[in-house]
Image (cartoon, helix red, strand yellow):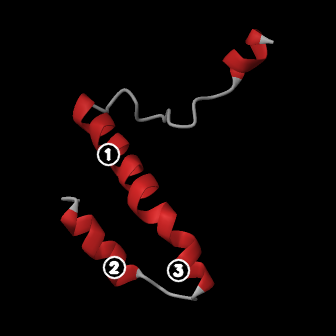
Amino acid sequence: MLDIIKKIPDPYKTSLDGYFREVHYQFRQELRQFIEDDIVPKCDHWEKHKISPIKEIIKLFGQKGF
């Protein structure tokens, strides 16, 4: 069973991994966390009310320093 698990590719590993520095990984993690915390929880509401929240999302990005 472990052999099968070891063969599953890392979804975050890319061909650019040799070029990334720690700051790149940190940015990716912060962005991923921001999306999980601030965007995903609002998606159901936006979809239910047929809202296109691009202005709200851009504002959130700015508030978080992206």
Contact between marks 1 and 3 (CB within 8 A): the answer is no
Q: Which mark is residue 46?
A: 3
Residue 4: horizontal and vertical position, in percent?
77, 17
Residue 38: horizontal and vertical position, in percent?
39, 61
Give the SS element for disc 2. Answer: helix
Residue at image location 41% in from the left, 35% down from the top = 16
Residue holding disc 1 = 30
Q: Earlier in the sequence, mark 1 or mark 3?
A: 1
Three-letter amino acid code of the residue under disc 2: Glu
Quarter of the image for the N terminus: give it: top right
Spatial distance from mark 1 to mark 2, Cα to Cα?
Answer: 19 Å
Residue 12: horizontal and vertical position, in percent?
50, 37
For the residues carrying marks 1 and 3, which lies nearer the camera in this image?
3
In this view, which residue lies farthest toward the bottom? Answer: 50
Q: Earlier in the sequence, mark 1 or mark 2?
A: 1
Give 53 or 6, whichever is nearer the viewer.
Answer: 53
Q: Which mark is residue 56?
A: 2
| Up-down relation of residue 42 to residue 29 (above or below) | below
Residue 65: horizontal and vertical position, in percent?
18, 59
| Up-down relation of residue 19 to residue 64 (above or below) | above
Three-letter amino acid code of the residue under disc 3: Trp
